[in-house]
Image (tube, rainbow, N blue to C red):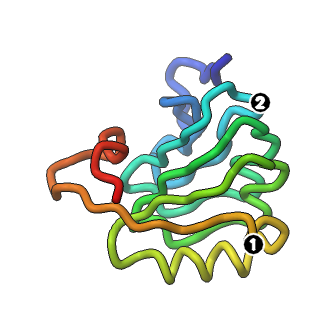
Amino acid sequence: SKFIVAKGSRTYASHSGALYTKDGKTLVQWLSGSPIAEAVVSDGVTTIARFAFSDSPKLTSVTIPTSVTSLGEQAFANCPKLSVVYTDAGNSERLRAMIAERNQVVADQIIVKEMTRPKNADARSTQTFRK
């Protein structure tokens, strides 16, 4: 399954199993019930919306770039297998605090790990560089 956005939409765009605002700055919704276990939020995204990853029972990890400065309430609700969130080096404490503040229900089940990647690598290639 995937999101289908009307051609020429001025509001939304979809790629990599997710629905984003047209400007690419907000991840609106990950495809609920997706069989994909690892989600990668695109570089440049600044906001992960409320309930963005909710009801994703197979999701085990999410990679979130440093560009994310806002995490919606219950963004990870009903993700029972989610156990690790990867982020760029130096961003783990800030991300841990955002998860604890806005997603209390799952905060104890998630470990935030830092990864290192070359500056010219895009978000789709992060898995290669995890520690």
Quadrant of image for the N terminus? top right
Q: Which amino acid does the dot numbered 2 rest on?
A: Gly
Image location of residue 20, percent across then percent down: 55, 42
| Residue hosting label 1 | 108
Residue bearing mark 2 = 33
Q: In this view, does 72 lie to the left or right of 18?
A: right
> Dot 2, crowdedness within 10 Å: few (<14), some or many (≥20)?
some
Q: Distance between the residues labelled 1 and 2?
A: 22 Å
* Residue visible at 33% across and 47% down in the picture: 126
Q: Mark 1 or mark 2: which comes first in sequence?
A: 2
Residue type at mark 1?
A: Asp
Picture coordinates of residue 129, whole percent (x, y): 28, 51
Residue 116: where, in percent of width, then height? 27, 61
Tell me where residue 11 sits by quadrant.
top right
Residue sitting at 42 percent across and 47 percent down?
42
What residue appears at the point 54 percent right and 68 percent down from the top-left corner? 112
Q: In the structure shown, which secondary structural element does the residue marked by tag 2 occupy? A: loop
Task: Please name which of the two marks, 1 or 2, marks the residue nearer to the observer.
Answer: 1
Relative height, residue 102 to residue 6 (above, below):
below
Q: Nearer the viewer, residue 64 or 18?
A: 64
Q: Position of residue 16 (x, y in %)?
A: 49, 30
- Residue 94 has which mark? none
Q: Quadrant of residue 122?
A: top left
Quarter of the image where the C terminus is located = bottom left
**In the displayed structure, would residue 23 be above or below residue 46?**
above
Left or right of 65? Residue 84 is: right
Q: In this view, does 100 lie to the left or right of 41?
A: right
Which of these two is toward me, 85 or 29?
A: 85
The residue carrying pointer 1 sits among few (fewer than 14), some (14 to 19) or many (20 or more) residues within 10 Å by Cα, namely few
